[in-house]
Image (cartoon, grey):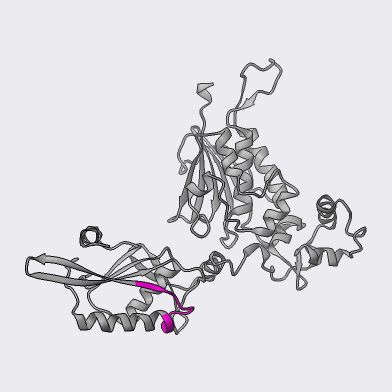
Amino acid sequence: MNAIELLDIISAGETSKVQFKQELDDDKITAEMIAMSNSKGGIIIVGVNDETGEVTGLSFEQLQSYNNRLANIANDKVKPQIFIDTEVVSVDIKSDDKRKVLIITVLEGINKPYKDKNGTIWVKQGSDKRRLIDNNEIMRLFQQSGNLLADEMEVYGTNINDLDNQSFADYFKKEFKESYEEKGLTYEQALKAKKVLVNDQLSLAGLLFFGKYPQNIKPAFTIKAVSFFGNELSGDNYRSKPEDLKGTIPQLFKKGIDFLNGNLRHLQKGQDFNSIGILEISEQALIEVLQNALIHRDYFKNAPVRLLIFDNRVEIISPGTLPNSLTVEDIKYGNPVIRNNQLAMFCSHTLPYSGLGSGLKRALAVQPNIELINDKSGEQFIVKIPRLSDQW
């Protein structure tokens, strides 16, 4: 980084990825490095007043001491250890006043969550940081590093009696072209082979896909479906507001598509007079987006998928932002990071789901005006589809 680039960054002030420190305080810098590693990474600029943005600079002795201390922090005070880069940049304040600052680059970590020697976990929140104490948020950090998958976790208090035997048997035969008996397996052995039963309890994927009454045990995992008059979410005038849609994921998918079909217009475009007409929004796009919401949502968040129909648009909202460093541009071009591997595998044999991360790409191909929003502040992923039936 050169001096002009550095001054440009400093002039913009502190952000979630840029922090100023006038001097090095080991405890504060440890917490900052942990927060950046647990978030999206960033840089810490030492030798800049964090209140005024003034470049105060560091002496040669400070630079030598700070580099040694930073290596000790990254190796010993952050758990697991992280790797950092340091760089010294000289800034000309006046013709006879050259000041040196130390730039510490911290990458987003791949072994989240990172913590200090006391077990404290820090994450970024805007230009500040906060201590993480919520178990669900901590589990999501494990999930981001691939060390914990929500759909493979055991659901406490469940057992084999919570499963619909016939539903699983039908699925098994569809996947393997033979029944589990023909494969020489008992019912219990087949359940364990497919990770539906883990240590005599159901996995979350097993419950959500083959459970008799999944919402009796996980009540938040429903679909909330509402058709509004007007275009405001705050409105209380509904065309249709059924009870929360419940059931297994295949049942939720069917009920969700039925709701969309029943509350969107079918338009005549050269069909026979007695034809039902063509849905105003591509049904293929709706199928792909709803599947995506049910399969790839964050199941560490106890919240429903939402289907919202307004006069001018449809919104399909799934809990959780895109996993890891995945971006909207990535998914537009079919670059997947599958969050729930077990659910994706079950869906590949049950729903019209390819499992290749190309669902939203296909949706955009048939409905190019889809808007994808990775809402980090609201911790949700939003798909907006305009209703353009007046142009038919």
**Residue 294 visible at all:** yes
Asked if residue 82 lies in the magenta stretch, the reply is yes
Task: Name the one closer to the observer, 202 or 255.
Answer: 202
The image position of residue 219, as x and y in percent, is 64, 58
Task: Specify whether 332 is left or right of 352.
Answer: left
Task: Name the one closer to the observer, 202 or 57.
Answer: 57
Picture residue at 21% right of the left edge, 84% below the top: 61
Residue range in magenta is 75-85
Choose top left, top right, bottom left or bottom right for residue 256.
top right
Task: Name the one closer to the observer, 348 or 8.
Answer: 8
Considering the image in quadrants, where does the N terminus appear?
bottom left
The image position of residue 270, as x and y in percent, is 63, 16
Considering the image in quadrants, where does the C terminus appear?
top right
Choose top left, top right, bottom left or bottom right for residue 94.
bottom left
Q: Is residue 321 above or below residue 33?
A: above
Q: How many marks?
A: 0
Picture residue at 75% right of the left edge, 58% below the top: 211
Task: Specify whether 299 is left or right of 115.
Answer: right
**Residue 247 visible at all:** no
Task: Name the one closer to the observer, 327 or 383.
Answer: 327
Choose top left, top right, bottom left or bottom right for residue 217.
bottom right
The image position of residue 146, as x and y in percent, is 58, 66
Asked if residue 238 lies in the magenta stretch, the reply is no
Picture residue at 80% right of the left edge, 65% below the top: 193
